[in-house]
Image (spheres, helix red, strand yellow):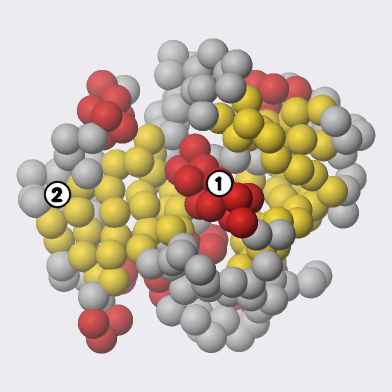
Amino acid sequence: MNPLQHIVEPEYLLLTWQPADEQAPARTRRVVAEIRPLPEGHAVFRYLRGTPDFAAAEHAGFRGFPAFPLDQEETRQGVLEALMRRLPPRNREDFAEYLAQHRLPHPFNHSDLALLGYTGARLPSDGFALVPVFPDNTYPCDYLMEVAGLRHVIGSDVASIRDGDPVSFEMDAENPVDQDALAVVHQGRRIGYVNRTLRQTFRRWLSGHIVQARVERQNGKPERPLVFIRVSVT
């Protein structure tokens, strides 16, 4: 396992949510909150009320993140501690294995904010995930990203995808759902998309930097495959 070499501290994190029900008519991942760092290792959590994504999430059944009351404007106490409970403790014996799954070095000598952002802090029991927002002009930067929408684009047909295969990115202006979609291309075939929450970051990377990406690993079930790509920006 070759860990990511260039870990960049996020400027802040976005909390995303999508319905856990596979049969839900609309499972678009929505941005519902932000987590911004404060001095001395603390953070503030704010719901992004008034945004189109938040309204769409509420319409789809979003009722707040369990640790943070939906009726509070912001939360400043115990924010990172609550989010870190979604990850194995750093002192657990298998923590190095957990880091390896996300291609992170051990020991991980970066902040909890970075650890949450680079792992996504996903749980199988809910639809929440964290996405890092990286500061401008902080390069080189490495990141491991799941290909979004894989099953909707190619189903379970991943036989031709191999670890180490290069991938590229292209705009999909004809996408019926999102005209700003950024497709992931493997051997001339679109296999999925960049997470819409990361799209602005990727555009910035692609507009003025060298971006190399390749398939890093695959897992999931035969009927629900997952493909992760390793992105390096210089």
The quarter of the displayed image where residue 149 is located: top right
Between 106 and 56, the one lying in front of the other is 56
Image side of residue 118 versus residue 47, left or right: right
**Circles 1 and 2: CB distance less than 8 Å?**
no
**The C terminus - image quarter:** bottom right
Residue sitting at x 75%, y 28%: 190
Residue sitting at x 37%, y 59%: 13
Q: Earlier in the sequence, mark 1 or mark 2?
A: 2
What residue is shown with label 2? 69
63 shown above or below 146: above
Report x, y in % for residue 42: 25, 76
148 shown above or below 15: above
Image side of residue 109 versus residue 159, left or right: left
Residue 24 visible in rendering? no
Residue type at tag 2: Pro
Q: CA distance from mark 1 to mark 2?
A: 34 Å
Q: Residues within 10 Å of mark 1 (few under 14, many from 20)?
A: some
Report x, y in % for residue 80: 31, 69
What residue is shown with label 1? 203
Residue sitting at x 20%, y 54%: 46
Residue 147 visible in rendering? yes
Please tell me how many numbered marks the rendered image carries.
2
